[in-house]
């Protein structure tokens, strides 16, 4: 990785966001990265991830072979990459948004009411 | 948020992962969270995000109204939530996977060869 | 349905295509119906369909309640509508394309080799 | 195509449905074709279709090269195939459902009110 600066300890979403900014800038790819296009790319990657699970059963999906895990891991990475790019373009703090959403869900789905049921969940 | 412990400084993917584990455990929802089902949920949320962009132009997608940004922010949060849940169930370190993927992409798409072109990108 | 001509026997894909053309024309919506946008809409509708199945099991998906079937039926209709609109805009004969694809699949997946196995299927 | 009976004039959705039934039966693939799995497959195929449009502009999507059209045509076929399989498994008359949906949309989007605007459309 020639020009790309990767911090010794590249462990945060912020450092990933910065790395991705640099990656796009060096390739002059920001012109393709409109929020609309990034939202498409994110959805396409999420589907490529789903593809690995389409013909297997739920129990099988819990015991994937190591080489399959590697493929799935690659797709999970792609989803995160586009998710961060899109959030960045929209100036959304992704982690903050997720914590807020969890807080909303705690209110929306009181544990004592929805325990063990996917019903409320599904019908939300 | 009654029972849910949120760290004073809930700022990392790890703390979000732990919060989501607790959220599911309290609702006994792990039974629904097979990797297969989480992959479906992730894809569905990515599509709900995309829905906001389907009839607008690329330029319009760069100037979303504040209330639209709020809605999109909520969908971005949902995608991250399922992405983390799925990674957790598959024991994948999401951030590590993403940095590795970027390194692969640096090799796959040399800046001097793909600069300003979506062609190589598209045909990959 | 005031202005929309529906043939007495509206039973073919062609008559549906023509009805959809008229529907869009009367609303001046062709300006939004670029193949790119229609491909997004199709994908979004397919996900809305999938949403109905995300937290239920495979056996449960075979015994949907009548009111759930009605909802799913509506989503199936939406998918077909955008599929036809997109095919129309690309001048693709959809039914012909599907029969050709089946013929390819007959060669690609010889019955005696793939019988009862999702493996070949999955890895294709 | 050895055993597969294709009518001399295979021009209807019904004949395609029957052909697909036979195709699955000969391969003993019905065991994998739960409505849940077919809904996943449909969504995955719709995304593969969308992938062809992700980095091009709307105007470009209106002038696809012939070889690109061929690829897209193949994906359109896949979407129709799974759409028909899923409708068949749910005993839904797809064409009838689509015509009904169009009639609903005629009422929901009166031409004189929504003409030339994607707004109502989007916010539906």
Image (cartoon, coloured by chain):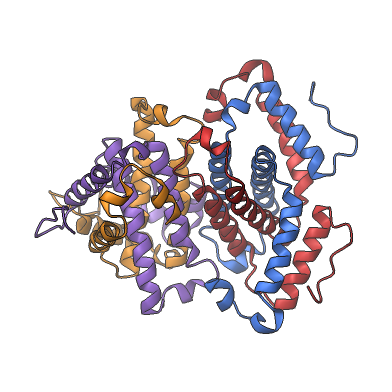
Chain colours: A purple, B orange, C blue, D red
State the residue lying farthest toward the top.
D112
Total tally of numbered discs in the picture: 0
Q: Is residue C40 above or below residue D110?
A: below
- Look at 13% across and 49% down and name the residue there: B9
Q: Is residue C26 above or below residue B51?
A: above
| Among the 4 quarters of the image, the one containing residue D99 | top right
Counting from the top left corner in percent of width and height, residue D84 is at: 72, 56
Counting from the top left corner in percent of width and height, residue C108 is at: 65, 73
Give B112 or A69, whichever is nearer the viewer: B112
- Look at 38% across and 61% down and name the residue there: A75
Give C53 or B108, whichever is nearer the viewer: B108
- Look at 42% across and 32% down and name the residue there: B58
Q: Residue C56 vs residue D112: left or right?
A: left
Q: Quadrant of the N terminus of chain D?
A: bottom right
| Among the 4 quarters of the image, the one containing residue C42 | top right
Give D6 or C80, whichever is nearer the viewer: D6
Counting from the top left corner in percent of width and height, residue A90 is at: 30, 35
Counting from the top left corner in percent of width and height, residue C57 is at: 55, 66
Q: Is residue A66 above or below residue C63?
A: below
């Amino acid at each position: 990785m020639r020009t790309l600066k990767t911090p010794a300890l590249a462990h945060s979403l912020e450092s990933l966001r910065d790395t991705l900014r640099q990656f796009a800038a060096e390739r002059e790819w920001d012109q393709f990265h409109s929020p609309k296009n990034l939202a498409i790319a994110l959805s396409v990657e999420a589907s490529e991830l789903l593809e690995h699970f389409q013909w297997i059963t739920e129990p099988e999906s819990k015991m994937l072979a190591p080489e399959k895990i590697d493929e799935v891991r690659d797709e999970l990475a792609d989803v995160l990459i586009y998710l961060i790019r899109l959030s960045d373009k929209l100036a959304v703090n992704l982690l903050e948004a997720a914590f807020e959403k969890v807080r909303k869900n705690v209110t929306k789905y009181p544990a004592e009411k929805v325990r063990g049921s996917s019903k409320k969940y599904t019908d939300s």
